[in-house]
Image (spheres, helix red, strand yellow):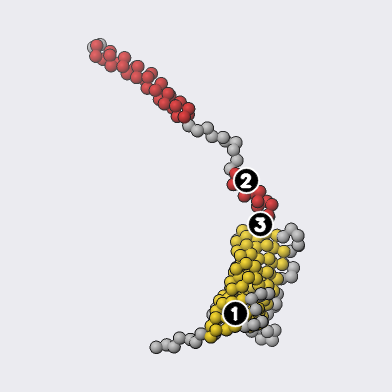
Amino acid sequence: MRAGDNIHSVVVAWMKIILPLVALGLLSTVFLFSRKVDLDQVIPFSQIDLTQRAHDQGVTNPSFAGVATGGEQVSFKADKVRPDRTKEGLLLAEEVRAELRLNGGAVVNITSDFGESDQIEYSALLDGNVHVTTTTGYDIRTDRINAQFDTLRAETPGPVNGTGPPGTLEAGRMLLTSEEEDGTAHLLFTDGVKLVYIPPKQKD
């Protein structure tokens, strides 16, 4: 055997011992300098969310639909709904969206920050930044509106303001109701109506 081959064999043998030891040393330093992780730690927001849901018994993105006695279609949606613990059949809602499809073809959309729906009385109270729009051209804002779903009726207890086909308007109350004879819906403004007429633009 040549001397060079003998030296080469010795070097290879030592490298087989040294390299694994170096790798083991580097691996140990990774664990020494890494941050300790507590595997028993609970994620705080996850626990809060579960506790809140169990306490509120809420439902997210629910929707309800029905038909009034006059044949009008009524739908009710919200981001979140939970039952009221103080009154049976009362639901508390957030970010409410209601749609009334009238027999004549017109559609009334109502949105509000909050709402209460009484499942026994077939009524709802929409509260906070109430916005009413209709496909006939009305855009009305108010603080609160009471709605009855079995017989189509929606009424504001306070003042309203907005725009409509005649122009800009203000009124002490607004009432949406349907006549029992023909089912035609009427939008009425009462209690001190102020109307600024805006003539339609003439076509060239």
Residue 14 is labelled as none
- Is the residue marked by circle 1 packed among few (<14), some (14-19), or many (20+) residues within 10 Å? many
Q: Secondary structure at mark 1?
A: strand
Q: Secondary structure at mark 3?
A: loop
Residue 184 visible somewhere in the drawing: yes
Q: Secondary structure at mark 2?
A: helix
Residue carrying label 1: 170
Residue lying at 69% horizontally and 86% vertically, measured from the top left = 181
Residue 65 visible somewhere in the drawing: no
Q: Where is residue 202 drawn, in percent x and y?
A: 44, 88
**Amino acid, disc 1:** Glu
Q: Is residue 55 above or below residue 119?
A: above
Q: Where is residue 36 drawn, in percent x and y?
A: 52, 32
Residue carrying label 2: 47
* 1 vs 3, front mark: 1
Q: Nearer the viewer, residue 105 or 38?
A: 38
Where residue 28 sits, quadrant-wise, is top left
Q: Quadrant of the N terminus?
A: top left
Residue 58 is labelled as 3
- Is the residue marked by circle 3 packed among few (<14), some (14-19), or many (20+) residues within 10 Å? some
**Amino acid, disc 3:** Gly
How far apart marks 2 and 1 lie (CA) works out to: 49 Å
In the shown orientation, is residue 125 left or right of residue 12? right
**Amino acid, disc 2:** Gln
Residue lying at 62% horizontally and 45% vertically, measured from the top left = 47
Tell whether label 3 touches label 1 (CB within 8 Å): no
Where residue 23 sits, quadrant-wise, is top left
